[in-house]
Amino acid sequence: MSRLRVPAEVAILLPSLLLVGCGATAKTPTPALTGDQLANAEYQSPTPAEGAVLLTDGEYHEPAAPGSASQVTVTMLPDLTAYGDLNGDGVSDAAVILAGSAGGSGTFITLAAVLNQDGEPQHVASAELGDRVQVHSVAIESGEIVVSLTTHAPSDPLCCPTLETERRFHLEQDQLVEVTPPA
């Protein structure tokens, strides 16, 4: 009985040709989110009355009241952005820190989870981190957002938080749920 010998090049290319011939195509990878996209995205925010802001170059401003010199502001803190998969789809998403002020002395810090929807940012959930807290770092580890920050101990004045802490969150549908640390 004689055996048919197939050259190595044909053996390698044949499966690919069969897939193309059958109409199968390779899926194009989803483009990664960029800092520029995140700095020009829309976010839900408790700071303005409308509940949403469209950032331009990482900032949003509007008068606190008609004719007022005070400004409502929301600012993305660009050095505090992390990238990683938040929803288990194998695509890199983002975690962003926003600082909001309604014109008073408070600066309210918010963690925003942003999914990568076909290369476009979609803000899906937020968690309030506190008034005048100091965020040191943000990371995404195994689908969890890890925030290292200094927050207020019970006796701290609002100006001066002293309590070093780490908070962890995971995305459940459209909510960021804080992960309770082990006791």
Image (tube, grey):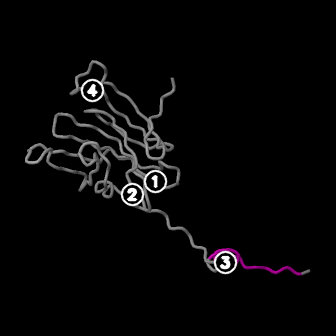
Which mark is on residue 60? none
**Contact check, label 4 and label 3, Cβ < 8 Å:** no
Residue 8, image x and y in percent? 70, 76
Query: Mark 4 and mark 1: span between their CA atoms?
Result: 33 Å
Residue 92: which disc? 1
Q: Dot 1 lies on which element?
A: loop
Residue 92 as seen in the image, left or right of residue 51: right
Q: Per the image, is 71 magenta? A: no
Instruction: Report, in whole angstroms, how far the alpha carbon at label 2 lies from the one at label 3.
Output: 34 Å
**Which badge, 4 or 1, comes first in the chain's sequence?**
1
Q: Residue 81 placed where, x, y %?
A: 35, 47
Tell which circle, 2 or 1, labels the residue nearer the N-terminal end.
2
Closer to the camera in the image, 164 or 12 = 164
What is the number of the mark on residue 18? 3
Of the residues under marks 4 and 3, which one precedes in the sequence?
3
Q: What residue type is labelled 4?
A: Pro
Q: What element carries label 2?
A: loop
Which residue corresponds to the image point at 51% horizontal and 26% vertical from the top-left? 182
Residue 53: horizontal and vertical position, in percent? 26, 51
- Is 114 on the left-hand or right-hand side of 100? right
In terms of secondary structure, where does tag 4 sit?
A: loop
Question: Magenta-highlighted stretch: main secondary structure?
Answer: helix
Q: How many residues crowd around disc 1 within 10 Å: few (fewer than 14), some, or many (20 or more)?
A: many
Residue kind at label 2, given as amino acid type: Leu
Q: Position of residue 55 (x, y in %)?
A: 26, 54
Q: How crowded is mark 3: few (under 14 residues within 10 Å), some or many (20 or more)?
A: few
Which residue has dot 4 on it? 161
Which label sits on residue 33? 2
Q: Tag 1 or tag 3, which sits nearer the N-term?
A: 3
Query: Magenta stretch containing residue 18, yes or no?
Result: yes
Magenta residues span 2-19
